[in-house]
Image (cartoon, rainbow, N blue to C red):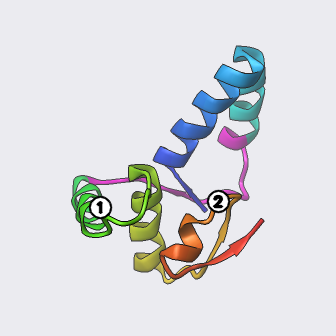
Amino acid sequence: MTTDYVVDETLTLLRMRLGVDAAQDWWTQVENSSRIRWEWISPARSDKARAWLFRWRDKDFSFTDCTSFVVMRELRVRVALTVGRHFRQAGFDELP
């Protein structure tokens, strides 16, 4: 499962670090994959993510992190595939 916000960040990172061809190759794989479940950040989810962002002032969560937290809570997902510490700080399990 992923969100449109995570895909946005990933495409941007690939484009900046590896170039547009790498970003396009990755997108082609993701877009055509039957193994990925897409979750979209609606206005309601965005509002909840903003509330999370402003409530946890002592953390350096990104807004995208917060949108993921909202979706994960809604769908009762407990484990995130991530390289950061933020999901653990927010109470989720992490797979590196």
Counting from the top left corner in percent of width and height, residue 44 is at 22, 61
Q: Which residues are magenta?
A: 30-42
Q: Secondary structure at mark 2?
A: loop
Residue 12 occupies quadrant? top right
Image height of 73 relative to 31, above or below? below
Name the disc covering residue 74, or none: none
Q: Residue furthest top?
A: 20
Q: Secondary structure at mark 1?
A: helix
For discs 1 and 2, the disc positioned in front in the rendered view: 2
Residue type pointed to by label 1: Arg
Q: Residue at x 72, y 32 (%)?
A: 28
Q: Which residue is mark 1?
A: 45
Image position of 40 (left or right of 78): left
Residue 46 colored in magenta in the image: no
- Badge 2 crowding class, 10 Å Cα cut-off, few under 14, some 14 to 19, many 20 or more, is few
Earlier sequence position, callout 1 versus callout 2: 1
Counting from the top left corner in percent of width and height, residue 95 is at 75, 71
Counting from the top left corner in percent of width and height, residue 75 is at 47, 78
User: What's the CA distance linking mark 1 and mark 2?
Assistant: 22 Å
Q: Which residue is mark 2?
A: 84
Image position of 92 (left or right of 49): right
Residue type pointed to by label 2: Gly
Q: Residue at x 30, y 54 (%)?
A: 42
Image height of 35 relative to 55, above or below? above
Q: Residue at x 61, y 65 (%)?
A: 85
